[in-house]
Image (spheres, coloured by chain):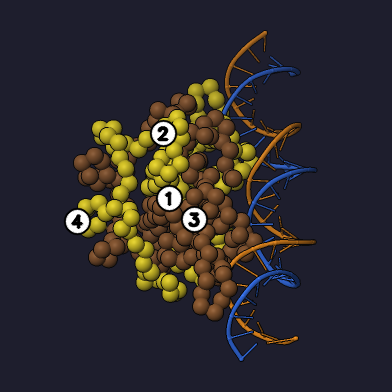
Chain colours: A yellow, B brown, C blue, D orange
Amino acid sequence: MPFKSLVEEPRCQVVRTLDVVGEKWSLLIIRNALRGQTRFSQFRDQLGIPSDILTARLATLVSGGILEKRSYREAGSRERFSYHLTEAGRALNIVIAALMQWGDEYNPSPYGQASLVVDGDNDDPLELAFVGATRAAVPSAEVKFLPGPASVVTW
Amino acid sequence: MPFKSLVEEPRCQVVRTLDVVGEKWSLLIIRNALRGQTRFSQFRDQLGIPSDILTARLATLVSGGILEKRSYREAGSRERFSYHLTEAGRALNIVIAALMQWGDEYNPSPYGQASLVVDGDNDDPLELAFVGATRAAVPSAEVKFLPGPASVVTW
DNA sequence: AGGTCTGGGTTGGTTTTTCCAACTTATCCC
DNA sequence: GGGATAAGTTGGAAAAACCAACCCAGACCT
């Protein structure tokens, strides 16, 4: 568990989220899971993550409610295990999409995008935007962060 | 630099973004900067980050184009340095907001939210949503990730 | 029955990061 | 000259990540 901030630790949403997904490799495992990958060997081979670290990450993601461990059996093979996103895990698509979108805009690859976010119904490209109660998009530069009810710090 | 994935490293937006902001503490420094903090002692005291690590992180964020180091001088003090978000740094608000939103929904604090995202014009609360070309919001569960033009891996 | 393959891991030892406490440096005010 | 303060440095201990080699259970092959 990576973060123990002093003053406001248990209250801050960002810290609490990073407690679950902030360790090295965790978000990449989740990204690959969002692409449909479910197996130890897929994660290990595609990410190049050391297998002992992968074992540890899968365990913390399972205990954090992001992944679910299931057993499966292919014809002609013994029982093995696979890892599937829970609803909470799938909801991390917003975090992955935010990282992708920032990378596309401010740190683009000369080769173009490695993955795209699309509408499942019609494959139209999507992007993330800040929206208000009226569902109208608000430009990112006009977004402000304010202390919420649980804030104990004045800033 | 935390990530060196084997097959598709330089292409993937998520990896490229995490190269810049994926080290421990980086995103929390950025969150505090989005709240308007600019000084070494503010980051150190509010986050509880060891000062040597803070020195290192500020340097990588500056060299990554997220923060800008400025000198300032308060009346009755010598010249000191402060750190200000660049445009690219401010654009990371989408990443911070995504982490906040997930935490609020799937790992909420009993005390409520520590910070809120609002419209700078009228302080109306905002949220992040996936939107298509028509600007209509698409439910998160219907969002799909597809290989893009730079993908070398079949998945 | 013995040997080999395969997926999903362990194990032991090295390297890299992080952490912590103590110290430093430059300037201002008294 | 002495104390305060912001922004760091330094040295050594602890934790995390890395790597290569190994293990293990069932399936399949001869």
Chain for disc number 4: A
Q: Check contact, mark 3 vs mark 1: CB within 8 A.
A: no
* Mark with earlier residue (4, 2): 2
* Residue A116 is at least partly visible in this image: yes
Residue kind at label 1, given as amino acid type: Ala
Chain for disc number 3: B
Q: Which residue is mark 2?
A: A113
Instruction: State the image quarter where residue A110 is shown.
Output: top left
Characterize the local packing of mark 2: few (<14), some (14-19) or many (20 or more) Cα atoms within 10 angstroms.
Answer: many
Chain for disc number 1: B
Which corner quadrant holds the N terminus of chain B?
Answer: top right
Q: Residue at x 52, y 34 (%)?
A: B10
* Mark with earlier residue (3, 1): 3
Chain for disc number 2: A
| Left-right relation of D24 to B116 | right
Q: Residue at x 42, y 50 (%)?
A: B88
Which corner quadrant holds the C terminus of chain B?
Answer: top left
Q: CA distance from mark 3 to mark 1?
A: 8 Å
**Residue A3 position within the rendered picture, expressed as x and y whole percent measured from the top left:** 55, 60
Q: Helix, strand or loop at disc 3?
A: strand
Residue kind at label 3, given as amino acid type: Leu
Q: Which residue is mark 4?
A: A134
**Residue C16 position within the rendered picture, expressed as x and y whole percent measured from the top left:** 68, 46
Is the residue at mark 3 from the same chain as the one at mark 4? no
Q: Nearer the viewer, mark 1 or mark 4?
A: 1
Q: CA distance from mark 1 to mark 2?
A: 18 Å
